[in-house]
Image (cartoon, rainbow, N blue to C red):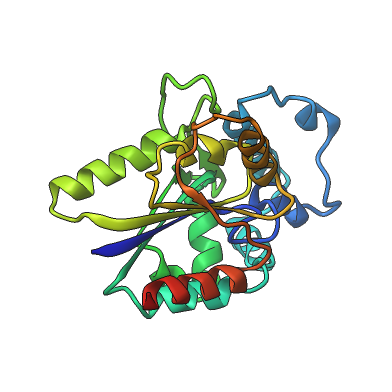
Amino acid sequence: MKLLMVFDFDHTVVDNNSDTWVIKCLPGQTLPDSVKNSYRKGHWTEYMGRVMNYIGDQGVGPDRVRGVLETIPFTPGMTDLLTFIAEHKDTIDCIVISDSNTIFIDWILKGAGLRAAVDRVFTNPARLNESGYVEVQCYHTHDCDECPVNLCKREVLERYLSEKTEAGTMYGRVVYVGDGGNDLCPASCLRGHDVVMPRRGYTLDKLLAKLTAQEGDASVKAEVFVWSSGSDILQELKTRMQS
């Protein structure tokens, strides 16, 4: 049976937030307070729509936006990990579930020559409109109280696994790699022989540690492997594939 690798993107695959990195394409590399202060908690995607509209209004074209996004640093060791995955597609499937958007992720992965590692990307749909502005939409609506209004990663993962099962693909193990608070919800649907990999010192790591400290809490059944670099994950992946 194949192994499924599931990645968050910002602060996991790349070592920053692509949604804030894009602001570097502005002449002053900053947003006016009118845009900054328009964010409402849980409504980040709507906020990014206003950010990209402002960027377009400043005469910044898609080529400039893409060029800036391609300079975002990858998390140490992550390019080696993704290269390894791309070379082992016979045994490893790989998906990204992210609260970024399709254009940003596609540009960044293609710019690094790593798009072949990822089979599917589940994120907020984006397109270039007639004016060349990046337009971002919410991925879906859901009933989960724990997640942002536009994306419940657990629902996405469960639906993907269900579709693959119906198509005849059963995964021997699911490995979920993430860093943020919105990665706890999908981690809670993993099985006992699956693995959740939180980035050391980040929100997901702290939340899982807190749950572990609560005696009798079984909300996350999967094994926990804490990582600091993609090299840690790659070594663990190689070890598990040999066992």
The N terminus lies in quadrant = bottom left
Taking the spot 69% from the left edge, 50% from the top edge, the residue there is 59
- Give percent across and percent down for residue 176: 47, 52
- Give percent across and percent down for residue 153: 45, 38
- Give percent across and percent down for residue 151: 48, 33
Q: Please state if 170 lies on the left or on the right of 236 as rendered.
A: left
Q: Please state if 205 lies on the left or on the right of 175 as rendered.
A: right
Taking the spot 62% from the left edge, 38% from the top edge, the residue there is 212
Residue 62, by quadrant, is: bottom right
The C terminus lies in quadrant = bottom left
Query: Which residue is at the front of the view, 196 or 41?
Result: 196
Q: Using the image, determine if residue 82 lies above or below residue 105.
A: below
Residue 213, by quadrant, is: top right
Taking the spot 44% from the left edge, 42% from the top edge, the residue there is 125
Query: Which residue is at the front of the view, 45 or 193?
Result: 193
Residue 69: tell me if it is visible: yes
- Give percent across and percent down for residue 159: 29, 38
Query: Which residue is at the front of the view, 210 or 157?
Result: 210
Q: Using the image, determine if residue 43 lies above or below residue 224.
A: above
